[in-house]
Image (cartoon, rainbow, N blue to C red):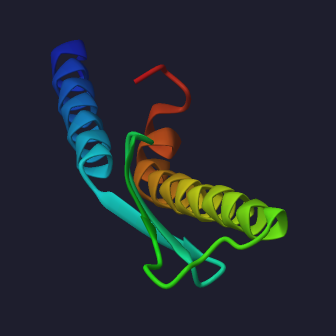
Amino acid sequence: MNQQVMLKKLMKMKEEMEATQQQIYDTEFKASAGGVVTVTIMGNREIVDVEIDKDFEATSKEDLEMLQDSIIAACNQAYDEIDDVTEEKMAKYSALTGGMGF
């Protein structure tokens, strides 16, 4: 295959990879924890919403600690989902580029 054809194919692949990455960035990922907290995080890892159940009442230090733990757990769950989706969608490019930095 001549170099121009190869270069065009690589450029097309790079554009597709960038479009896929942008699609992931624009996707909202929601996760819940403890039955109290729901977070919404964009694919670029920006937290855009934290919802706390309207019936939740913190009546003790332990309640606040549980709320904090639930927020952390929900965020981590959403981040794990982002990682899984990114790995799944970008895997075909990793195999094709062989680590060429695209």
In the picture, measured across the screen, residue 77 lies left or right of residue 63, that is left
Q: Is residue 66 visible?
A: yes
**Position above or below: 36 against 4:** below
The percent position of residue 4, horizontal first and vertical second, equals 16, 15
In the picture, measured across the screen, residue 33 lies left or right of residue 55, that is right
As drawn, the residue found furthest toward the right would be 62
Q: Quadrant of the C terminus?
A: top left
As drawn, the residue found furthest toward the top would be 3
Q: Name the one closer to the observer, 8 or 48.
A: 48
In the picture, measured across the screen, residue 56 lies left or right of residue 47, that is right
**Position above or below: 30 against 42:** below
Residue at point 43%, 51% (across, down): 92
The percent position of residue 51, horizontal first and vertical second, equals 42, 67
Q: Quadrant of the N terminus?
A: top left
Residue at point 51%, 44% (across, down): 95
Q: Name the one closer to the observer, 86 or 68.
A: 68
**Position above or below: 49 against 20:** below
Q: Name the one closer to the observer, 31 or 7.
A: 31
The percent position of residue 61, horizontal first and vertical second, equals 81, 62
**Position above or below: 2 against 67:** above
Residue at point 56%, 79% (across, down): 56
Residue at point 60%, 58% (across, down): 80
In the picture, measured across the screen, residue 17 lies left or right of residue 47, that is left
